[in-house]
Amino acid sequence: MTFRNAPPQALAPAQLAALKACMREWAAELGFQHLGVAGIDLGEAEAGLLRWLTRGFHGDMDYLARHGTRRSRPAELVPGTVRVVSVRMNYLPAHARAAAEVLDDPALGYVSRYALGRDYHKSVRARLQRLAERIQGEVGPFAYRVFTDSAPVMEVELARQAGLGWRGKHSLLLDRQAGSWFFLGELYTDLPLPVDLATEHHCGTCTRCIDVCPTAAIVEPFLVDARRCISYLTIEHHGSIPEALRPLLGNRIYGCDDCQLVCPWNKFAGTAQVEDFNVRNGLDGAALVALFAWTEEEFEGRLEGSPIRRIGHERWLRNIAVALGNAPPSPEAQAALRGRLDHPSALVREHVAWALARQGGSEEM
């Protein structure tokens, strides 16, 4: 079917339906596992977002409040938007060391599975941009903008409305065939594509994600207090990690996957089909002492192209210091910590002193 006998925005319903079917094929060729289309009415989700912000659950992420309604009203963020194309891409590395094995060994550093390879912001967004260009090559010029966790976008709600899954009790998107180990991306567009049906909820009475959370951050079903979330504390939070929560972090040095690891639906999850998400630098189970020894230059060089690089060397050391403080006492851990006692950063020194005291060493040394 031809798509060039009218302006893209004036395509007939049958043409738009055919275009959407083609878009799904093109998306699959680019490595996406699913594509759906949502409208732009996020009124119910907006009310929930405002309640969440009012309770202060966003912590230091002030940008969430500053964005106002642009997050929940797509046409305010990108004028002219009438549809949102939502896509998902698997990221679970096929050959990574088993998560449980790493979490059970306090001498190793646990890195969230999504961050073991290249930065998904660049990888997913680049492929989504190529999809948009493919569409434009078929239909002619149309208005669009691509996003991958890079702007005020309610990606989970949009994906839910686009039929890609339902919002789990841990607040992540879930799918019966794919679990939750995937990234989301969005294409805001003025093309009036036919929308998909939202997915029904399938968590039932299960509360495994709530029960397993190390810091009790999931305060009730579908509601996460980011201030207690390990992913927030190790990635988004810039300051000192509250002392009461430090022991609960265990050896998690970048993010946390516990709620996903126990989810029954993830037994159906597929692995990454894109090489970008393969394990780099042995981060699927590297020794804490070795990671703590990285200089800032090594950190920047080794993690070039990695999402971890965004937190900077200072917070990297902060996180690993906490993990070393949670590890069984050992001469290696104590020596590593003593080597950072005079670090230029007060933030690093504070966490090193705490960890060294937990190790049984003297913070005065």
Image (cartoon, grey):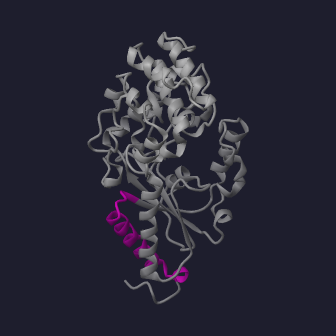
Extreme-bottom residue of the structure: 5
Res. 87 visible in picture: no
* Picture coordinates of residue 251, whole percent (x, y): 43, 26
Q: Position of residue 188 (x, y in %)?
A: 55, 66
Residue 316 visible in the snapshot: yes
Find residue 164 and report its image quarter: bottom left
Q: Provide the major secondary structure of the magenta segment.
A: helix
Magenta part of the chain: 8-34
Q: Position of residue 227 (x, y in %)?
A: 62, 32
* Residue found farthest to the left: 95
Above or below 246: residue 313: below
Residue at 35 percent of width and 64 percent of height: 30
Q: Is residue 154 above or below residue 297?
A: below
Q: 125 or 138, which lies in front?
A: 125
Q: How many marks?
A: 0
Asked if residue 346 is among those painted magenta in the image, a careful observer would answer no
**Which of the two residues, 349 or 169, is positioned nearer the viewer here?**
349
